[in-house]
Image (cartoon, rainbow, N blue to C red):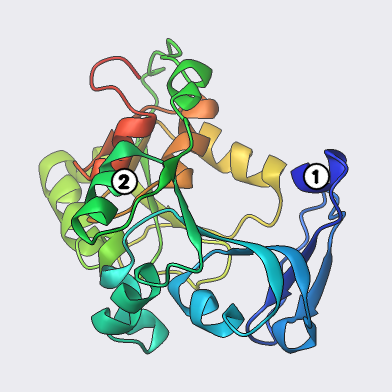
Amino acid sequence: NRFITAGLETTIYVMHANTIADDPDLPRLFDIKPLASLKGAGTIIATRFDTVEATLSIPARRRFYFVQQIETPMAKYCGATEEDVLRSYRHTEYEIITIGDHLAKQLAEMGRTSTVLDVGLYTALYPHLPRQWDGRQPFRVLMYGSPADYKGGADNPKIAAALRERFGANIEVNSFHRDIAAPGWADNHYRPQSTSEVARVYQAHDLYVYASLSDGFAMTPVEAMSCGTPVVLTDFSGKDQYAEDGIN
């Protein structure tokens, strides 16, 4: 949508037959087509390791690979190997764009230069919003419902159990995910389908806990922060682009 409102003709090409869900709060201005129908482009932006391989043979004047994280931890969830992922970073036909110095450093160790987009503005966008717990019981904790272990999925049941052991009946541990059914560790599960519905879920909770192991840039903590919901994060490198300990 932002490319289009900037005057650029833009189409999303998907690898498989899946579609991008519509958000009633955010009208979709772009077309969605199968990648097999793309015969050429002015600019191709590959957004994942497998789309690099899939677009190599398509004629284009410029090619970019947008790297949000070094994707080896998620390889098995895509039916790929770590070598499949690492190969994508070696294709010099693509200029690499990253979203943080930590990723640029990792890519440099692989022999690749990259352009870092300054997303430090997120820190200024989402400063600490004073929000005092109103004392209601139970204290409501929200966690992301992904089963993927690189997003902390394997640790979520342990965290939920530890919270309940510590606080007993005074805590409620809930989950959310737009596309995944309720996990066994959650008291309640939410599947918000629009931006405004997502915001209401965050705002209804007293704390958001995000236990990722390797995210390059995780959007859900940024969303929670923008709703004024306090956030607890594990120490993955990508959080440094927007989260300051003791500040927000």
Helix, strand or loop at mark 1 = loop
Query: Residue at (19%, 61%) from the top-left corner?
Result: 155
Which residue carries the number 2 mark?
Answer: 104
Which residue carries the number 1 mark?
Answer: 25
In this rendering, would 45 be left or right of 169? right
- Residue nearer the viewer, 155 or 58: 58
x, y (%) of residue 215? 33, 53
- Residue nearer the viewer, 225 or 238: 238
Q: What residue type is labelled 1?
A: Asp
x, y (%) of residue 213? 22, 56
Q: In this view, does 133 lie above or below 54?
A: above
Quarter occupied by the C terminus: top left
Q: In this view, does 96 lie above or below 116?
A: below
x, y (%) of residue 55? 60, 79
x, y (%) of residue 214? 26, 56
- Residue nearer the viewer, 159 or 217: 217
Q: What residue type is labelled 2?
A: Ala
